[in-house]
Image: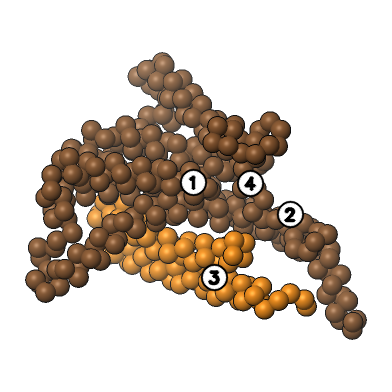
Chain colours: A orange, B brown
Amino acid sequence: MEGDIANMGQFIGAGLAAIGSGAAAIGVGTVAGNYLAGALRNPSAAASQTATLFIGLAFAEALGIFAFLVALLLMFAV
Amino acid sequence: MRPADEEMTDVAEEASGADGGLVFHPLDQFIVKPLIGDGPVHWYTVTNATLWMAIAVVCIVLLLVTGTRGRAVVPNRTQSIAELIYGFVYKMVEDVTGKEGLRYFPYIMTLFLFILFANYLALLPMSFSTTSHVAVTAVLGFGVFLTVTALGFILNGPSFLGMFWMKDAPLVLRPIIAVIEIISYFVRPVSHSIRLAGNIMAGHAVIKVFAGFAAIAAISPVSVLAITAIYGLEVLVAGIQAYVFTILTCVYLKDALHPHH
């Protein structure tokens, strides 16, 4: 294994940033799960809330994408 | 070197090119190249990004022009698609922003169609994914941000700033909330554009990573199956991201039209 310590730091940092994707997965799961729970209790109100569902999913997912972006920056841009 | 290490190196070399890493770089697909020759890329150079954006625009024009040419009472397939997309976006704008927002429907329809077609054209093999570039999505995102902010001030005057001053909150907390609201307002265009670019770029990069694994004989069947599955997911993501971008535009537009809700 060659390479200097700065490279090692980059890769470790990128790996740590990837944890953020998992955290975003928890968020997306919470949003979708709660929507489903609510939709099964009151199916007649479910259709009107799909837009809210997607907005919530988008906000939760965006932060995971930011974490992925940090990982990419560390891997290829720093 | 011990035998175990040698074995590892063999497997690694099988999967890697001359200078280590995968056979091809998963992010190589996003390189912007001039279409003719390989000189430097200026702002006026016709690149593969320009080509695929133009193809997206041509496809939209073809769909809408051929779709609305007949204006049959019983629509044919092209007309049905055009009407479905029109009705879908129209209803979305009406639901989120109310009747007043319908005046801005053409802008939102344009955004939706462009992003949808760019996303789907990017899924064709050997094509170039224009929406995976933050430069492209940032123009769309900051365009929405500037439009909405200007619109908010034109329609509401200085009282548009009341959006940041929460009347329902206790007086002590209001300045703190105002700071947070202002920060979140200015982060909007960044997250708006990076969400789209990041999703598309991540999806395409994952497909390429699995395509790189296909070079290793032992796991190539698994990776081909994985590519198929991820491609299906990406078809879904392409549609959802176009929808999310447009619906967030509608939400921001609603804030400009009714800042005190």
Q: Are marks 2 and 3 in contact (CB under 8 Å)?
A: no
Label 4 packing within 10 angstroms: few (<14), some (14-19), many (20+) = few
Badge 4 or badge 1: first in the primary sequence: 4
Q: Are marks 1 and 3 in contact (CB under 8 Å)?
A: no
Q: Return the chain for callout 2.
A: B
Q: Are marks 3 and 4 in contact (CB under 8 Å)?
A: no
What residue does disc 4 label?
Answer: B31
Does residue A36 appear in the picture of this structure? Answer: no
- Single out the mark in the foreground, 1 or 2: 1
Indicate whether B215 appears above or below B124. Answer: below
* Position in image of residue B47 (x %, y %): 61, 35
- The structure residue drawn at horizontal position 33% and vertical position 35%, both measured from the top left corner, is B107
Label 2 packing within 10 angstroms: few (<14), some (14-19), many (20+) = some
- Single out the mark in the foreground, 1 or 3: 1
How far is mark 2 from mark 3, CA to CA?
22 Å
Badge 1 or badge 2: first in the primary sequence: 2
* Position in image of residue B135 (x %, y %): 49, 46
What residue does disc 1 label?
Answer: B135
- The structure residue drawn at horizontal position 66% and vertical position 33%, both measured from the top left corner, is B35
The residue lying toward the viewer, choosing from B37 and B173, is: B37
Q: Is residue B67 left or right of residue B39?
A: left
- The structure residue drawn at horizontal position 44% and vertical position 68%, both measured from the top left corner, is A24
The residue lying toward the viewer, choosing from B166 and B59, is: B166
Q: Which mark is residue B24?
A: 2
- Single out the mark in the foreground, 3 or 4: 4
- Single out the mark in the foreground, 2 or 4: 4
Q: Which mark is residue B202?
A: none
User: What amino acid is found at the position of numbered circle 2 in the picture?
Assistant: Phe
* Position in image of residue A63 (x %, y %): 42, 64
Q: Is residue B40 left or right of residue B234?
A: right
